[in-house]
């Protein structure tokens, strides 16, 4: 019998995020999986109803939906925890030299494989990923994602100015390579792999390059990702580079890249007008609190963005953050904003799914969704709510016991 026909019941403490201010606790709960999909989540033991189903008692482990990391740089995997200084120094001294190494396909393959293994070991089953500028390295990243079965939005970084010579592209070449990747990979592997156009940030992209991306996105409905207002020096530099523009966000808006399928990372140093503009364009924001602390970038005005109605989800932004653990991003989000562990869990799961237009497929335990989940060993504990608090405040990768991608056990 193949996995597609297999019916399984997992018993554990199931924590199901359903809204920013609501999680449902099942203590114990029974998660019924049919093949690759969630069939049911219930407080009542369903074994008599499903005779012949495999039954697995997880021994009080906590079962959570797979994490959605909405901002991560694959080619920085090998330099997590390395480097010092703020954003612009760090890019030049640590990041760019490492990304240059992805011109070598063997190196790209080695790091891509290790990256996806580590992503899954952390319980992340969907990710939005920046590659290096190299087309071939981006193909390799897609191939590695497909081999693991994870959902991934992957883009070749675009840089046509203010970059080291090894990483600076001709504008037309950058567009053409991105289009080839889009045509090869977008919606492949059953729709689980998506291409995302990836102009790195306004300082390393010409207005004409960004305008072309905007045109393509409008014509094809493609996803776009970039960085916005991460660091004070970066913001000042962008103002100098685009002297006629009203603001940093207005640079992207004038290029036509702000829309509901655009993810902007960081969004720390924004005016009220810029926040309104992002809300008006329905831009999705990736909040990367650990990276923001590690690079001394500042704290994203989370409540202001939320009150403006902007969709916010969590991203690791390695190697800005020194870990792929979404638990550690939750902890940093709680510390930076005072949000509850429940809200942090929502940001790490269902909010990311919604930002990607996937709330009907992933993000929590609703029947019919993909059976992407992890089991975490949390002890000692008293209640499910306390277990969630422990997960939000103290947990890291070492606590992850098992990870399932569409019902397949991928890490244990
Ligand atoms: Zn980033």
Image (cartoon, rainbow, N blue to C red):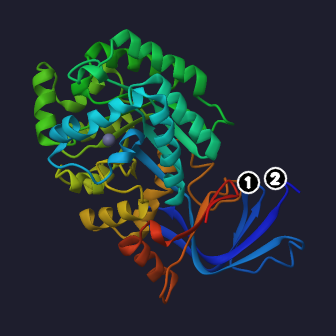
Residue 395 occupies quadrant: bottom left
How far is mark 2 from mark 1, CA to CA?
Answer: 6 Å
Which residue lies at the image location 17% right of the left edge and 42% below the top edge?
231
Q: Is mark 1 within 8 Å of ligand 1?
A: no
Q: Compare residues 269 and 190 and report the one nearer the observer.
A: 190
Q: Quadrant of ligand 1?
A: top left
* Residue behind mark 2: 4
**Residue 40 % position (x, y):** 73, 66
* Quarter of the figure with residue 130: top left
- Residue 354 seen: no
Q: Nearer the viewer, residue 360 or 59?
A: 59
Name the side, left or right, on which 199 lies relative to 35: left
Counting residues from the N terminus, which is met first, the one under dot 2 or under dot 1?
A: 2
Q: Residue at x 59, y 46 (%)?
A: 150
Question: In front: 134, or 315?
Answer: 134
Label 1 sits on a secondary structure element that is loop
Number of the label disc, if any, that sits on residue 365 = none
Q: Tell which residue pokes out farthest to the top in this image.
A: 172
**The N terminus, quarter of image:** bottom right
Q: Is residue 345 left or right of residue 227?
A: right
Badge 1 local density, few (<14 within 10 Å), some, or many (20+)?
Answer: many
| Quadrant showing the C terminus | bottom right
Against 266, is 24 above or below?
below
Residue 33: image location, x then y, percent: 74, 63
Which residue in the structure is indicated by mark 1?
36
How many residues crowd around disc 2 within 10 Å: few (fewer than 14), some, or many (20 or more)?
A: few
Location of residue 375 with respect to 68 vertically, above or below: below
Query: Where 356 sits versus 196, above or below?
Result: below
Residue at 27% of width from left, 38% of height from top? 95
Percent coordinates x, y for residue 298 in the rendering: 17, 52
Between 86 and 381, the one lying in front of the other is 86
């Amino acid at each position: 019998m193949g996995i597609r026909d297999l019916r399984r019941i997992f018993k554990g403490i199931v924590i199901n995020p359903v809204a920013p201010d609501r999680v449902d606790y099942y203590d114990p709960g029974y998660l019924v999986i049919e093949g690759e999909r969630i069939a049911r989540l219930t407080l009542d033991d369903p074994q008599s109803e499903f005779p012949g189903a495999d039954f697995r008692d997880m021994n009080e482990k906590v079962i959570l939906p797979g994490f959605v990391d909405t901002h991560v740089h694959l080619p920085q995997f090998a330099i997590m925890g390395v480097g010092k200084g703020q954003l612009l120094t760090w890019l030049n001294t640590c990041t760019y030299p490492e990304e240059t190494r992805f011109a070598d396909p063997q190196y790209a393959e080695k790091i891509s494989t290790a990256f996806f293994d580590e992503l899954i070991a952390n319980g992340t089953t969907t990710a939005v990923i920046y590659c290096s500028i190299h087309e071939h390295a981006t193909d390799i990243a897609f191939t590695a994602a497909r081999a693991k079965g994870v959902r991934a939005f992957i883009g070749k970084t675009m840089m046509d100015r203010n970059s080291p010579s090894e990483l600076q592209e001709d504008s037309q070449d950058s567009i053409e390579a991105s289009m080839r990747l889009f045509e090869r990979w977008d919606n492949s592997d059953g729709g689980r792999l998506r291409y995302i156009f990836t102009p790195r940030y306004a300082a390393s992209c010409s207005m004409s390059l960004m305008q072309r991306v905007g045109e393509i996105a409008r014509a094809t409905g493609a996803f776009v990702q970039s960085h916005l207002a991460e660091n004070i020096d970066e913001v000042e530099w962008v103002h100098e580079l685009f002297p006629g523009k009203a603001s940093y966000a207005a640079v992207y808006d004038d290029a036509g890249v702000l829309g509901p399928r655009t993810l902007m990372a960081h969004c720390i140093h924004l005016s009220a007008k810029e926040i309104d503009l992002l809300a008006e364009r329905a831009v999705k924001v990736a909040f990367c609190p650990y990276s923001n602390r590690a690079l001394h970038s500042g704290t994203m005005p989370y409540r202001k963005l939320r009150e403006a109605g902007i969709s916010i989800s969590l991203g690791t932004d390695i190697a800005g953050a020194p870990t792929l653990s979404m638990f550690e991003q939750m902890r940093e989000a709680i510390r930076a904003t005072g949000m509850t562990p429940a809200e942090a869990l929502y940001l790490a799961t269902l909010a990311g799914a919604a930002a990607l237009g996937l709330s009907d497929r992933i993000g929590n335990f609703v029947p019919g969704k993909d059976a992407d989940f992890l089991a975490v060993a949390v002890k000692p504990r008293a209640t499910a709510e306390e277990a969630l608090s422990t997960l939000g405040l103290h947990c890291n990768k070492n606590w992850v016991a098992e990870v399932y991608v569409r019902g397949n056990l991928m890490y244990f």
